[in-house]
Amino acid sequence: MKEVKIYTDGACSGNPGPGGFCAILVYAGKEKVISGGEKVTTNNRMELLAVITALEALKEPCRVEIVSDSKYVVDAIEKGWLASWQAKGWRKADKKPVLNVELWQRLLPQLTTHQVHFNWIRGHAGHPYNERCDAVAVSESQKF
């Protein structure tokens, strides 16, 4: 199974507002940059879209490490919130509806296709790939 490292970031000017996302896929010393954005969105949606589009770009099942500065995304997976939300009919512990359900549902099949591990890093702390992702995500948000 191929091993791929994916760095992601999302950006939003206003929340909601124009937003962008970026993912950098690294495999066998090669890089692929995926980016996009939306005119009216939120930061969390952009963080999720970065992860989803990166995983969807993989052509076969892979072992994947996703490096993200999004506690929202990383904690939802690594702390089991996503599984709990799904089991509770897309309700959080406080009984309120989960936000971005359609994106979480889009992510779920990717998490079963690939062996995915999430690694949280502090944003804007000088990590080269995180800084690159942030710059591209901000650039994407400015297109709107």
Image (spheres, rainbow, N blue to C red):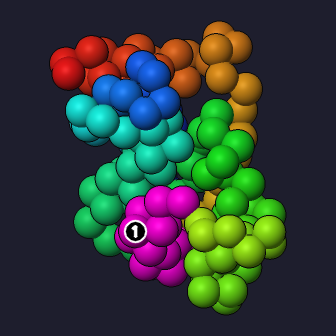
State the residue in front, 83 or 4.
83
Check residue 109 for magenta coloring. yes
Check residue 90 for magenta coloring. no
> Residue 144: where, in percent of width, then height?
20, 21
> Residue 112: where, in percent of width, then height?
51, 80
Q: Quadrant of residue 26?
A: top left
26 lies above or below 114:
above
The residue at 64%/34% (across/down) is 69
State the residue in front, 106 or 119.
106
> Residue 94: where, in percent of width, then height?
80, 69
State the residue in front, 8 or 73.
73
The magenta-colored residue range is 99-115
Q: Quadrant of residue 140?
A: top left
The three-letter amino acid code for the residue at tag 1 is Glu
95 lies above or below 49:
below
> Does residue 67 appear to the left or right of 109 in the view shown?
right
Residues packed near mark 1 inside 10 Å, few (<14), some (14 to 19) or many (20 plus):
few
Q: Quadrant of residue 14?
A: top left
Residue matched to label 1 = 102
> Residue 110: where, in percent of width, then height?
43, 71
